[in-house]
């Protein structure tokens, strides 16, 4: 029994080994299968030449064209403030904004009027005495009379006193008028620093106001963009009479995008030494008026906006996505046999999302816009859209406007 326990497992193991050997000897070799390569799947766009106008994009903040501190020219206590003189309040040119206590200046005016009347009486008395002195000398004197005898110095002094009294009266009237602080232009209150009952010294700042006839936006442009727009540049001794290029301003307010029309009006004289950019100024007329869109809000000072500046006409050019550009000036083109070809192009301008060029392609050419790891001239590709001749494809004539 003990020998059987050892012999039975060994027999089973030997039988398994024999079966395995027989299977290895009698195995069949697999038939070789040919390995085929699948062309890469790509997207392509058909292009056509179009008449194009350059657009230069920039960003800036809205600023007031006119902004000043409202300052009192007389001392006194504030007795009245206009309801419009609040932060954000609108006012028109000549509107009364603040009144200062006038009693001291009314008394000063009365004293000045009295002094003027006294000076006139003094002058009339001196004129009469001078006439009497001249007549007496003509009747009794001999030879030329001295100016002092004829009371000429006294007459001149009385005349000067009269002129001084007139000046004091004008100053008193002016100070009284300055107690009524009026708006120098139509505008809006930017900051308010006083209130009713407050005593002010001469030169105290009442608040800050800015004009509302038009607003300005300072836009920084790279020097390379000079060739694409007609900048309003003035030379010494010359004045520019034509209007600058149009500008479309975009901004988001209340979760909605709004736009305002503007124009370039001038170029600032210096180039920024740090950024090597120049600043141009766009003007928006009547920024607080209601526009054609009743839902559009006014253009507030301090708002950050994106600007699209109308450029020069480019003539007939091609547009392609910038993602399709390879090696700075090359595009991958798919020929009629669905094979990849390399074309060098003459780039006119590179933008953030597209490339503008003139030569190198023909109308209807298919531009490959899909990235390829190792593109080779003549390699076969598959188009993502259905197979159809290039003439039947929807031509790629333009790109959607770039998102500012």
Image (cartoon, rainbow, N blue to C red):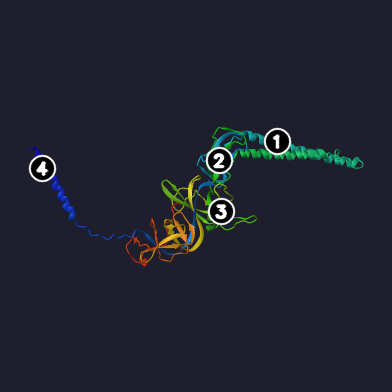
Q: How far apart are marks 1 and 2 (CA)?
A: 39 Å
Q: How far apart are marks 4 and 1 (CA)?
A: 149 Å
The residue at 67%/39% (across/down) is 171
Q: Which of marks 2 and 3 is in front?
A: 3
Q: Earlier in the sequence, mark 2 or mark 4?
A: 4
Give the camera-side residue of 36 and 14.
14
What percent of the width, then of the height, locates residue 337? Answer: 36, 66
Q: Which of marks 1 and 2 is in front?
A: 2
Residue position marked by numbered label 3 in the rendering: 265
- In the image, is residue 154 above or below residue 303? above
| SS state under label 4 | helix
In this view of the protein, can residue 107 be seen by the observer? yes
Q: Which residue lies furthest to the left in this view?
A: 1
CB under 8 Å between discs 1 and 2? no
Residue position marked by numbered label 4 in the rendering: 8
Mark 4: few, some, or many residues within 10 Å (few <14, many ≥20)?
Answer: few
What's the mark number on residue 390? Answer: none
Residue position marked by numbered label 2 in the rendering: 208
Q: Distance between the residues labelled 3 and 1?
A: 55 Å
The residue at 53%/52% (across/down) is 222
Q: Nearer the viewer, mark 4 or mark 3?
A: 4
In this view of the protein, can residue 283 be seen by the observer? no
Q: Which of marks 2 and 3 is nearer the N terminus?
A: 2
Residue position marked by numbered label 1 in the rendering: 114
Mark 1: few, some, or many residues within 10 Å (few <14, many ≥20)?
Answer: some
Q: Which of marks 4 and 3 is nearer the N terminus?
A: 4
The residue at 68%/34% (across/down) is 111
Q: In this view, does 142 lie to the left or right of 74?
A: right
Q: Which of marks 3 and 1 is nearer the N terminus?
A: 1
């Amino acid at each position: 029994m003990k020998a059987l326990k050892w012999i039975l497992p060994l027999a089973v193991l030997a039988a398994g080994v024999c079966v395995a050997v027989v299977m290895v000897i009698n195995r069949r070799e697999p038939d070789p299968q040919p390995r085929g390569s699948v062309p890469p799947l790509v997207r392509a766009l058909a292009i056509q030449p179009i008449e194009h106008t350059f657009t230069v994009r920039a960003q800036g903040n809205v600023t007031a064209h006119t902004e000043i501190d409202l300052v009192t020219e007389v001392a006194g206590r504030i007795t009245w403030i206009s309801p419009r003189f609040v932060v954000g309040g609108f006012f028109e040119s000549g509107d009364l904004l603040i009144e200062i206590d006038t009693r001291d200046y009314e008394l000063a005016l009365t004293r000045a009027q009295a002094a003027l009347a006294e000076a006139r009486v003094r002058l009339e008395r001196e004129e009469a005495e001078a006439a009497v002195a001249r007549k007496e000398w003509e009747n009794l004197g001999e030879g030329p009379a001295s100016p002092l005898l004829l009371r000429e110095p006294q007459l001149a002094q009385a005349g000067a006193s009269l002129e001084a009294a007139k000046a004091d009266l004008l100053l008193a009237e002016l100070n009284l008028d300055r107690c009524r602080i009026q708006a120098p232009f139509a505008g809006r209150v930017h900051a308010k620093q006083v209130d009713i009952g407050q005593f002010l010294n001469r030169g105290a700042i009442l608040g800050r106001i800015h004009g509302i006839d038009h607003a300005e936006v300072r836009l920084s442009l790279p020097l390379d963009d000079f060739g694409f727009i007609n900048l309003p540049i003035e030379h010494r001794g010359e004045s520019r009479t034509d209007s600058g290029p149009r500008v479309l301003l975009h901004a988001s307010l209340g979760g909605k995008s709004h736009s305002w029309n503007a124009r370039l009006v001038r170029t600032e004289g210096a180039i920024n030494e740090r950024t090597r950019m120049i600043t141009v100024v766009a003007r928006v007329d009547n920024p607080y008026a209601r526009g054609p869109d009743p839902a559009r809000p006014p253009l507030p000072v301090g708002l950050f906006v994106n600007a699209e500046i109308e450029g020069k006409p480019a003539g007939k050019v091609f547009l392609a996505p910038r993602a399709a550009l390879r090696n700075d000036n090359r595009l991958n083109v798919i020929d009629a046999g669905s094979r990849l070809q390399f074309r060098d192009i003459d780039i006119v301008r590179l933008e953030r999302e597209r490339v503008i060029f003139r030569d190198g392609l023909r109308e209807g050419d298919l531009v490959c816009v899909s990235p390829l790891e190792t593109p080779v001239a003549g390699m076969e590709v598959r188009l993502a859209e259905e197979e159809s001749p290039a003439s039947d494809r929807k031509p790629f004539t333009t790109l959607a406007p770039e998102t500012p």
